[in-house]
Image (spheres, coloured by chain):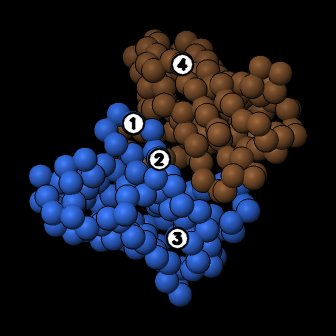
């Protein structure tokens, strides 16, 4: 069975601070995909990034960066110079190649960025 | 760019009533997924369809049924509604069943009173 754990249920930072959201996953499959989604207060789920299990290269997109480490089964998400608009719930999710095509989500981390 | 459309956006029903939620995937996407997100919870997978056939089934109650039509839109039918069915219901679509990204609609907020 697959499992995604986001140990931080809530994080509060002041604008311009850097913040890292942790994600730890469990799967026995060797081929899988990891995702991050953002859920702002309006409720929709916004796709941020996908990572394949065979590609451990880290990625940077503007103020966002992701650190994928298979050795620790982690896929952490860092926001640099946070802004109030980053306030949202962030979900890490896992899709396993041999277990259907559904996403297994972590419990989410609520990020509050204060001005 | 066109996104996933869900209707209605909000729905209020009473216990034991029925509800039908609709989902219109992104054009040329042939796979549809349904998720249920309870208050303060993460989304839970219910069911998915690929080319109008059920492809995967998750924790969908027997009171719920779904289908995908020839134009690829999907409907989630919910009967004998219970208070615990109150949730945000998301539909997501992808280009094919093996594709990676699932793009989510805005969700339908169902309230059962």
Above-or-below relation of B103 to A22:
below
Say which quadrant the N terminus of chain A sits in: top right
* Tag 1–tag 2 contact (CB < 8 Å): yes
Q: Which disc is residue A7 wearing?
A: 4
User: In the figure, what tint was chain A given?
Assistant: brown
Q: Is residue A8 something that shows in the picture?
A: yes
Q: Position of residue B63 (x, y in %)?
A: 32, 64
Q: Mark 2 — on which chain does it sit?
A: B
Question: Relative to B40, is A46 on the left or the right?
Answer: right
Residue carrying label 1:
B41
Residue at (45% x, 38% y) in the render: B42
Q: Mark 1 — on which chain does it sit?
A: B
Question: Relative to B88, is A91 on the left or the right?
Answer: right
Above-or-below relation of B70 to A14:
below
Question: Relative to B47, is B80 on the left or the right?
Answer: left
Residue at (37% x, 58% y) in the render: B61
């Amino acid at each position: 069975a697959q499992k995604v754990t986001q140990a931080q249920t809530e994080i509060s930072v002041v604008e311009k601070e850097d913040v890292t959201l942790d994600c730890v996953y469990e799967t026995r499959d060797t081929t899988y995909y990891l995702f991050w989604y953002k859920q702002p207060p309006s409720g929709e789920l916004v796709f941020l990034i996908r990572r394949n299990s065979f590609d451990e290269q880290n990625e940077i997109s503007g103020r966002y960066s992701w650190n994928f480490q298979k050795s620790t089964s982690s896929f952490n998400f860092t926001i640099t110079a946070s802004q109030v608009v980053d306030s949202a719930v962030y979900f890490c999710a896992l899709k396993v190649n041999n277990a259907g095509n559904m996403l297994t989500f972590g419990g989410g981390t609520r990020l509050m960025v204060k001005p | 760019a066109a996104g996933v459309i869900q209707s209605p956006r909000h729905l209020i029903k009473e216990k034991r009533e029925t509800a039908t939620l609709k989902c219109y995937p992104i054009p040329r996407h042939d796979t549809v997924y349904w998720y249920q997100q309870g208050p303060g919870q993460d989304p839970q997978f219910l069911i998915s369809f690929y080319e109008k056939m059920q492809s995967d089934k998750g924790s969908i109650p027997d009171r719920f049924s779904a289908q995908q039509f020839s134009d690829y839109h999907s409907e989630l039918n919910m009967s004998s509604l219970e208070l615990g069915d109150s949730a945000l219901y998301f539909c997501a679509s992808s280009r094919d069943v093996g594709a990676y990204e699932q793009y989510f609609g805005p969700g339908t907020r169902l309230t059962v009173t």
